[in-house]
Amino acid sequence: MKNLQCILCGSDHIKNLESINTVQLARLYKKRARVDVRRFFSENVIDYCECQDCGLKFYWPQAVGDGKFYDELQHYKGYYLEEKAEFIEASKYVSQNDDVLEIGSGEGMFTNFIRCKSYTGLEFSDNAISIAKEKGISILKQSIEDHAAQYPEEYDVVCYFQVLEHVPNPGKFIKDSLQCLKTGGKLMIAVPSEDSFISEAVNFYLNMPPHHSSRWTDHTLKKIAELNQLKVITIFHEPLHIIHRKFYRKTKIYKLLSSANSGNARSIDLGVSNAIKYGLSTIFSHLPILSDRYNIGQSVLIIFEKSNKTM
């Protein structure tokens, strides 16, 4: 696409995968989440793109949710899980001698899973900061850009869970976070996995703007290491969470019902035939006709080591 650069690597080799009708997208948010998102879209179409160099999939123009939007989403069942497999896995790489920075920390729930020398969270939600303060958890209302300028190479561990897919400029966000990290320190990132079943879900509005700005495969996550002189320590895919099993079965059954014209699959389909397939998928998802025991869940965690002092 002409004059458009990748928001991760800066490449101008961009392919337009699909043009999404923002009126239909706003209708989905209103119907299923009871949230009005029309204010985030200045145009009637938003493009779903893919970088041909790093593989990042992202939306353009960017439409990023604000604090009010996320407050309104809190009532969504399963939106925020207090116990996450990614927390448990990440905690294995944190020692009691580490200074830890968590970006987009919320109430500081990750502190329930780690023992460390010090913990600092960055968060913009006043409510989350207030709750954390009552628990004695240090949370600052500060951007990573400002924090990096103030505390260069301060931390042994920098982490962010389910944050990167929401930011409009992930390339710069990652570089700012690495400025805070000591040489030899660990960067931990967890995002929704585009290699999981959620990439096949039709009308999955939470994986589109203004909620998600980008989509991440393992291939793209590994590109972060190449772009920033990092070493990949591990990649961990969470097991399918019990609360997501019905969603998984519905998605897989829907795909089977749509297999005849799978080449024309789109992110949004509000047609009558789609409604019928969706209804059938919901009915059949209650039946034990599809095993979900051995399938990966929605989230992936990647852990890097910062081996180069100059970022």
Image (cartoon, rainbow, N blue to C red):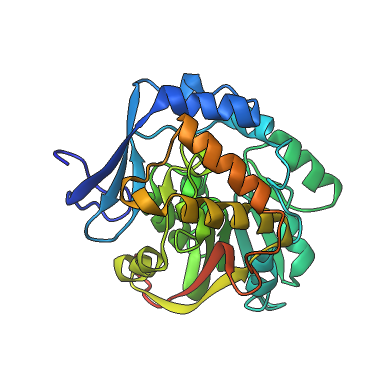
Residue lying furthest right in this view? 134
Left or right, 261 with reference to 164: left
Can residue 283 be seen by looking at this rendering? yes
Image coords of residue 255 (percent x, y): 47, 54
Left or right, 9 with reference to 304: left
User: Quadrant location of residue 74?
Assistant: top right
Image coords of residue 251 (percent x, y): 55, 53
Residue placed most toward the observer, 175 or 297: 297
User: Quadrant location of residue 85?
Assistant: bottom right
Residue lying furthest left in this view? 2
Q: Is residue 108 above or below residue 222?
A: above
Image coords of residue 288 (percent x, y): 70, 64
- Label total for image: 0
Q: Residue at x 75, y 61 (%)?
A: 83
Residue placed most toward the observer, 204 or 189: 204
| Image quarter of the N terminus | top left
Q: Residue at x 40, y 65 (%)?
A: 221
User: Quadrant location of residue 174?
Assistant: bottom left
Can residue 142 be seen by looking at this rendering? no
Q: Residue at x 48, y 30 (%)?
A: 272
Residue placed most toward the observer, 144 or 269: 269
Left or right, 302 with reference to 308: right
Q: Residue at x 60, y 52 (%)?
A: 250
Left or right, 74 with reference to 229: right
Q: Is residue 196 above or below residue 278?
A: below
Image coords of residue 28 (percent x, y): 54, 29
| Image quarter of the C terminus | bottom left
